[in-house]
Amino acid sequence: MTDISESIEIKAPLEQVFKYAVNHRNVPKFIASVTSYDPTTEALWGVGARFAMGVSVKDFRFTQELEVVEIQLGRSLHVRSLSGQPFQDAKWFFEHTARGTKVTYEIAYNLPEVFLGRKLDEKTRQQLDEQIRSDARLTLENLKLQFEKS
């Protein structure tokens, strides 16, 4: 299992940042490599809400179903994959700062030995790891841009 944690400060009120980030319609606008994020349940948010997430990383394209497993209004969101590869467990934390909101994005994932029918050699595994790390940083930068456009 690989763990990544990235944080960023956004010059915007916590309530606005949280509301934007947990809205499923906004996910493809700021989460790097996500191409779609569509509800698979009637619930559009909250514990138990599920979403089909389309992802494109390097030359890999795949879909996963994610479920919201915990949410604390204005504080955190936790989603976990139910199906598809790689397994992922993502957490978002939001906290007030003197200048706005600190957002922390933590993702734990496991790249299987065989991914989408392809055996992953060490070089491909390293490239995917680097891309996922880069995407975590880019995700937070994209979120910040939604509030701090020049």
Image (cartoon, rainbow, N blue to C red):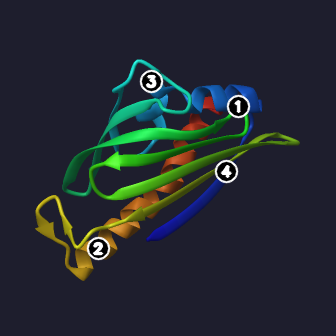
Amino acid found under the numbered disc labelled 4: Ile
| Figure check: 79 above or below 12 | below
| Residue designated by label 4 | 8
Q: Nearer the viewer, mark 2 or mark 1?
A: 1
Q: Are marks 4 and 1 in contact (CB under 8 Å)?
A: no
- Residue, far bottom: 122
Q: Earlier in the sequence, mark 3 or mark 4?
A: 4
- How many neighbours does mark 1 have within 10 angstroms: few (below 14), some (14-19), or many (20 or more)? few
Amino acid found under the numbered disc labelled 2: Arg
| Residue designated by label 1 | 73
* Whole-number angstrom distance, CA of label 2 to CA of label 4: 27 Å
- How many neighbours does mark 3 have within 10 angstroms: few (below 14), some (14-19), or many (20 or more)? some
Q: SS class of the residue under badge 1?
A: loop
Q: Earlier in the sequence, mark 3 or mark 1?
A: 3
Q: Earlier in the sequence, mark 2 or mark 3?
A: 3
Q: Nearer the viewer, mark 3 or mark 4?
A: 3
* Whole-number angstrom distance, CA of label 3 to CA of label 1: 18 Å
- How many neighbours does mark 4 have within 10 angstroms: few (below 14), some (14-19), or many (20 or more)? some
Q: Position of residue 75 (x, y in %)?
A: 72, 39
| Figure check: 137 above or below 118 | above
- How many neighbours does mark 2 have within 10 angstroms: few (below 14), some (14-19), or many (20 or more)? some
Q: Earlier in the sequence, mark 2 or mark 1?
A: 1
Amino acid found under the numbered disc labelled 3: Arg
Residue 6 appears left or right of 120: right
Q: Nearer the viewer, mark 4 or mark 1?
A: 1
Q: SS class of the residue under badge 2?
A: helix
Q: SS class of the residue under badge 3?
A: helix
Image point 88% across, 42% down: which residue?
98
Image point 21% across, 49% down: which residue?
61
| Residue designated by label 3 | 25
Specify the label residue 125 is tagged with: 2
